[in-house]
Image (cartoon, coloured by chain):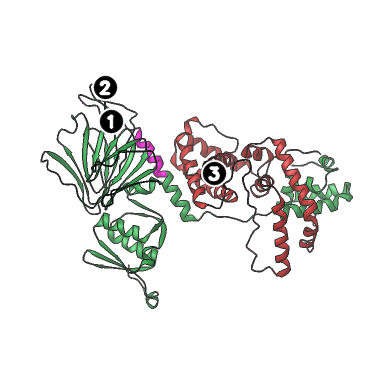
Chain colours: A red, B green
Amino acid sequence: MLYFYLSPLMDNSHQKKEHKYWQSFLAGDRESFSWLYETYVDEIYSYGLRFVSDTGLIEDTIQDLYIRIWNNRNGLKIPPSVRNYLFTAFRNLLFRKLSRLSHVSTNEVKDDNHLFNWELPIEDEKVRDEEQNSRFKQLQKLIDVLTPHQREVLFLKYYYDLSYDEIADVMGLTVKAIYKVAGRAMKSMRTQWMNLVSLIIISQSFIW
Amino acid sequence: MRGKKDVEVYKDFIAEDFAQDDYFIQSVRITDKETVAFWAFFLAQYPEKSHELEKARMMVELIQFREHKLPPLKKEIIWQKISSAIDQKRSRGSQVIGGMFFKYKSAAAVIGVLILSSIFYYFSQTNHSVYAAGEGEFKEVILPDGSRVNLSSRSQLKLHKDFKDAANREVWLEGEGYFSISPRINKDSIKSTFVVHTKDLDVEVLGTTFNVNTRHEATTVVLNTGKINVKFMEKSLKEEFLKPGDKLTFTEKLEKVEIDSVNAMDYISWKDQKFIFDNTSVKEIAQKIEDYYGYKVWISDSSLANREISGILTVEGAPKLIDVLSTLLNIEIEQRKDSLFFRERLSRTTNKTVEK
């Protein structure tokens, strides 16, 4: 199958902006450092919650992450995407903490068999009727069939709009492997979801 | 940007291929003239693909995740902790003035100590200097050897007149202090130690930052960076070496030593005149008010005492703190002489206008 890479949805002006802030942060500017925190901490936190439910652990990891990059800024370069760099560093740090914890309690997760929670949006739970509710549950079941890696790739792709190259960076895998994981996930979605999907979105018409 | 010649690229695509394609995803997310035109053109060429395209669009739309937001207060607390940790690190590089007999290292490691105690250490020596911080005062003191000490409210620090020239530097602390200690090498090239004496234990600095607190029945030592060792007056107890993030608690009555792992920043934020509450109970807050402002605090019931809050308050004197706390906790705080009474607001008075 033919795949090809297109520049992702991230627009250019943002990239320029984050590079500008990153550069002055490297020079020791606290304001810029604060901007890097303000701008990305919510997404990092949200990402972390997919792996573990322990918010305290995530908060500690975020704290360590920012202290580390500040203290080590002399050795840092300008990454192609600052956001992506922070995701990667955060993920590594979190997994290191988790593997340290797993020495203590045996049921904790490790890097290669970590969990990845995919919860569906909750906002319309109150307005859903019985029928919708049961479909929602079915959908959640089908999601549960996907492997943690598949879920994570879909999350980074569709929720955070990362490119396949960037996802490979964050997850520490090759781009080829990411395409493979994504491909399998989509295939499993197609075969398992389609019946359900056509029921759910039947009322919406195709507008193109 | 896709040109019309690119439609061919998609001619063999099935639903999941479209759903993974960045241009396709973008088209689903943001409908604009260009993408609409492109896909219309594509469908004109390959009308048999319309079903696959529709499926692909459904797939993309179905991939949704629950949103998790970092609560704004947490966001601020984490930032404050990051900031204090960084300031901490920064003060390490500070240069120290050279003495007659001693060489100072310029990239000196700094030691911070926080000490707290209720029973004061009594001094027999008359030949000493005293640094003191009064009620509600937070002072920064530079010692003759260039070491810095932040003294918390109602605390004092004493040192011998010959502090600077002694082989080993010694200070006596009552209350609470945060120490940034400059390492020093004396004329015989032997590292000079720095010892903080408290009523029940001594903290010996090996090149670090730590925090000692002797105000309560229990004395606590919190190590921020580096290495310290703690020796006890009670000789049956063996000395303890602490690593960063360790909090040592010594309860004199029980002769019990406990070492926990903590976030050091929570214990030293006061030096920047900030209270950081991170799921801190009202009981603990009351303790701080007693320590810093000398009030006796009475809490009406245990459910209130155990209530936890999170937040950052800048210390601007007791009246302001009391005002903010009563609003934050939605409780009544009554002041009678040197006592503060914390109690739940009666429901009928909740709507009463509070005079500011």
Q: Which residues are magenta?
A: B83-99
Q: Is residue B245 left or right of residue B146?
A: right
Looking at the rendered structure, the kind of residue marked 1 is: Val
Name which quarter of the figure residue B182 lies in. top left
Q: Is residue B85 covered in magenta?
A: yes
Q: Residue under circle 1?
A: B96
Instruction: Report helix, strand or loop for mark 1.
Output: loop
Closer to the eye: label 3 or 2: 3
Question: Along the horizontal axis of the image, is B70 left or right of B283?
Answer: right
* Dots 3, 1 in contact, CB < 8 A: no
Q: CA distance from mark 3 to mark 1?
A: 44 Å
Position of residue B288 measured from the top left corner of the image (x, y, whole percent): 30, 56
What is the three-letter code of the residue carrying label 2?
Ser
Report the number of numbered marks.
Answer: 3
* The C terminus of chain B lies in quadrant: bottom left
Which numbered dot is residue B189?
2
Disc 2 to disc 1: CB gap under 8 Å:
no
